[in-house]
Image (cartoon, helix red, strand yellow):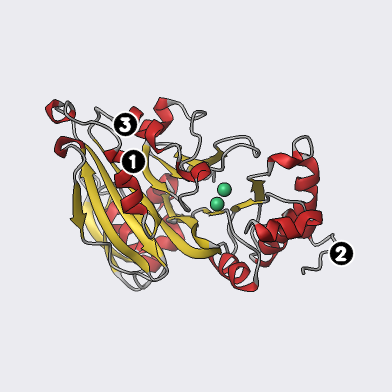
Amino acid sequence: MRPIVQWQLVNDPFGDPGVYGEFMFEKRAVLFDLGDIANLSPRKLLRLGHVFVSHAHMDHFAGFDALLRVLLGRNLRLYLYGPSGFIDRLEHKLRAYTWNRIRSYGENLVLDVSEIGPAGPSARASFQSKESFGREPLTPAAREEDTIARAEGFRVRAATLDHEIPCLAFAFEEERHVNVWKNRLAEEGLAVGPWLRKLKKAVLADAPDETPIRAAARGDEETHTVERSLGELKRTVLEIVSGQKVAYVTDVVYHEDNAARIAALASEADILFIETPFLHEDAEAAAKKCHLTARQAGLIARRARTKRMVPFHFSPRYTGRAEDIRREAEAAFAGTDETAALR
Ligand SMILES: [Zn+2]
Ligand SMILES: [Zn+2]
C-alpha cells in the first residue's frame, strides 16, 4: 500500500534544512525545521498542523516570520515544538511587531508552543491573535516515554542530542492502517455499518483476539447482529498494514552517546533524513562545528537499520561536489566502505 504521508526536503541539500510531510488524502501536513521556507507555497503552509524545530540556529528558525505572515487572519491552531527556551524565543519574535489591528479580526490564530527537555515536554504556552499574541501558560502534555506529540493517525517521538547546545531529533510514526476487504465481508455474510469503526478501534487498541465484536450480518430483508471474535474477523475481513516511520536528524556532533540515541530513535525507519554537512576528509572541521561527516551519518543509518537514508544540509564549501557527499554516505550505509573506521 502507498504511504499516507509523502515527504520532501524543503530545499536543495545546500539550502536551509527542513522536511515537509503531506497527508495524501487530507489537507494536513507537518514540518521539521523552520529555516528558509520560500519553496513552500501558501497552500502548503496553510496545511501545517505541527511544526517541529530542532534548535534555534538561524538556518532552522528564521522562517517563522514568513510562516506567521501566511497564517495570519485565519482560524487555525498550529502546534510548535522546540528545545528548552523555545517559548521565550518565539515570544521575542512575536513581540517584535505591532499588533494593534489584529484584535478586530474575526478570525483567531492560535500558536500552541511546547518545549521539549531531555525528560520530555517541560513547558507549554499559547499565543492567540485575538489576544494580540499575549503569552498564556498551559500545562505541558503528560510525559509518555519519548512521545512528544500525538494527533489523529500519528505520533512523534524526540531525542535530545548534543550540538554543543541541545538539539532535538524527531521520529514520525504513522499509526497502523486497518483496511476492510469489502468482498470478503460479503462472502462472510456480513454487512458494512458503524460496527466496522468499533472493530478498527479494537484492533488499534491491541484488544485480545478473543474480544467479542457485534457485527452486522445480512438477512433476507434487513441486517441483524451476530457475534464474532476479533481474531476471526482479523483473519477473514481485515488487512492490517504497519504505518510508515520517518526520522529527521540534523546538527549533531559525532560521539558514541549521540550515535546510540539516533540509532535508537531512528531504528528500522522507512526513511532517515540525516545531515551530512562535511566529507570525512574534513572530520576535524566537522567535529569543531559539532556536525556529522557523510561517513558518520551513513554508519549511524546502518546501525539504525533504516531502509532508506536521505542526506541533506551540505556545507557550501562542497558546492559542485554533492555527488561526493552522497557517495561517501551511501558507501558507509551499505557497508561497502572498508576504510570506514571512525576516529
Ligand atoms: Zn544547521
Ligand atoms: Zn545548528
Indicate which label's residue lies in the foreground, 3 or 1. 1
In the picture, measured across the screen, residue 50 lies left or right of residue 257, that is: left
Measuring from the top left, give residue 202's x and y in whole percent.
Answer: 32, 63
* Residue type (three-letter) at the residue carrying disc 2: Thr
Residue type at numbered disc 3: Leu
Rate crowding at label 2 as few (under 14), some (14 to 19) or many (20 or more) other CA atoms within 10 Å. Answer: few
- Of labels 2 and 3, earlier in sequence is 3
Type of amino acid at the residue the image marks with label 1: Lys
Quadrant where the C terminus is found in the figure: bottom right
Which tag is nearer the camera, tag 1 or tag 2? 1
Which secondary structure, mark 1?
helix
Q: In this view, does 335 lie above or below 246?
A: below
For disc 3, does the CB lie below 8 Å from ligand 1?
A: no
Asked if the residue at tag 2 contacts the one at tag 1, i.e. Cβ–Cβ closer than 8 Å, the answer is no
Residue on which disc 1 sits: 93
Q: Nearer the viewer, residue 133 or 38?
A: 133
In 3D space, how far apart are the residues under numbered discs 3 and 1 (Cα atoms)? 15 Å
Report the residue at 63% width, 65% height from top.
304
Disc 3: CA contacts within 10 A as few (<14), some (14-19) or many (>=20):
many
In the rendering, at what x and y percent does residue 58 appear?
49, 43
Front-lying residue, 41 or 271: 41
C-alpha distance separating marks 1 and 2: 47 Å
Q: Position of residue 93 (x, y in %)?
A: 33, 41
Q: Name the residue that disc number 3 marks.
A: 71
In the displayed orientation, state which residue is furthest to the right: 338
Q: Do the residues labelled 3 and 1 touch (CB within 8 Å)?
A: no
Residue 151, visible in the rendered structure = no
Q: Please tell me whether residue 216 is drawn above or below residue 121 in the rendered image.
A: above
Residue drawn 59% across and 54% down? 270
| For marks 3 and 1 on the same chain, the one whose residue lies earlier in the sequence | 3
Reading the chain from its start, which is encountered first: label 1 or label 2?
A: 1
Residue marked by disc 2: 339
